[in-house]
Amino acid sequence: NPQWAWWSDRALELMATHGPKHFSACTHELLYHMRYPQHMGNHELERAAPSVQYRAAIGAKGSGHSVLRQRDGDSSLTLVSDSDTIGSYHFGQARMVAIRPTVAFFGKAVVCPSHWQTASDGSYLAEVKIEAPYFSPLSAEDAAELPPNVDPLDLYHSRRQESDVCHLLTQINVMPKDNGFDLHWTLIPSVASWDVMTQLTLQFSPEGQWDLDYGLRLLADGVYLMEGRWAIYRCGPWVLEVERLSPEEPEHFLPALRGDVERTGSRYLLLNGLSGTPTKLSVRAYQAGVR
């Protein structure tokens, strides 16, 4: 398969740049090369770069797919399941390397779709249900069995009965466009009057820079809160323009929600809100001087 041969060459080029976590996932390929060298030496196989325009759904899973990928020239959108990030968007050297929705819900911050579906209009859909309980007090019998050096007020969830289980339904809709994509994220808590804090984190490659004339507030090192309607990221001539379609004023000012994954690197853009108001944004890509 000439395209797979082309991709294997690209993977080999990138393996040396991966950290230990990624490299360990590649060791079985290296072992295969060592165990079956007679099958791996066909260097004369024709190479064929993949098409610069395609849509692909990878890994059938339930009623959807584990990976959705769409590419059109220099623009590429990828959506994934079972990860602490739902996807990425690249336009030339301007790279949005992670899109991460999180919620302040019992410390279970990460919103992790189990699969993605494709709607009839070409948009992509994911639904995530999050469940979290309170815990009843320890019974007198269980408290009496605790070791003498343990405070009975300690949580000891493994010995407590669950009570008042709460549910949160989140729905993500990603709509590809000719030069970018739109994203709508809605939360439906099981208690109608209960506001849940939300945070949509967009992480960009550190090679680029922010245009700081559009209302970005620095919350922490490399972490900016989107207070206005626009945020513009530039890497050379490549530009990603983020427009907030939901209300412009942030509903809270937390730099991170409890239970979120550890952040590494820089160039983070936060859209903070509450569950009662859907988070909506538009991402458009263009080259400087060309719209």
Image: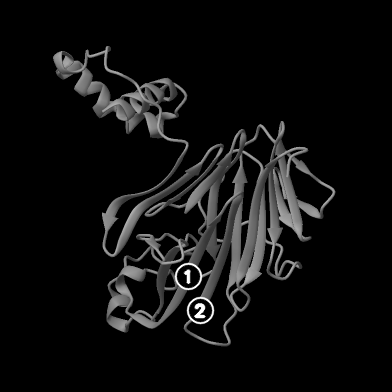
Residue 41 position, x and y percent, is 22, 13
Residue at (66%, 42%) from the top-left corner?
267
Q: Is residue 254 visible?
A: yes
Residue at left offset 85%, top offset 49%: 213
Depth check, front residue: 186 or 165: 186
Write the residue at 31% across / 68% down: 158
Query: In the picture shown, does residue 111 fall above or below 135?
Result: above
108 lies left or right of 220: left
Left or right of 111: which side holds 97?
right
Q: Counting other residues with Cα less than 10 Å from the Cα at mark 2, is it few (<14), some (14-19), or many (20 or more)?
A: some
| Among the 4 quarters of the image, the one containing residue 46 | top left
- Residue highlighted by disc 1: 171
In the picture shown, does residue 142 fall above or below 54? below
Q: Position of residue 245 (x, y in %)?
A: 69, 66
Rendered residue at 14%/13% (across/down):
38
Q: What residue would you read off at disc 2?
A: 188
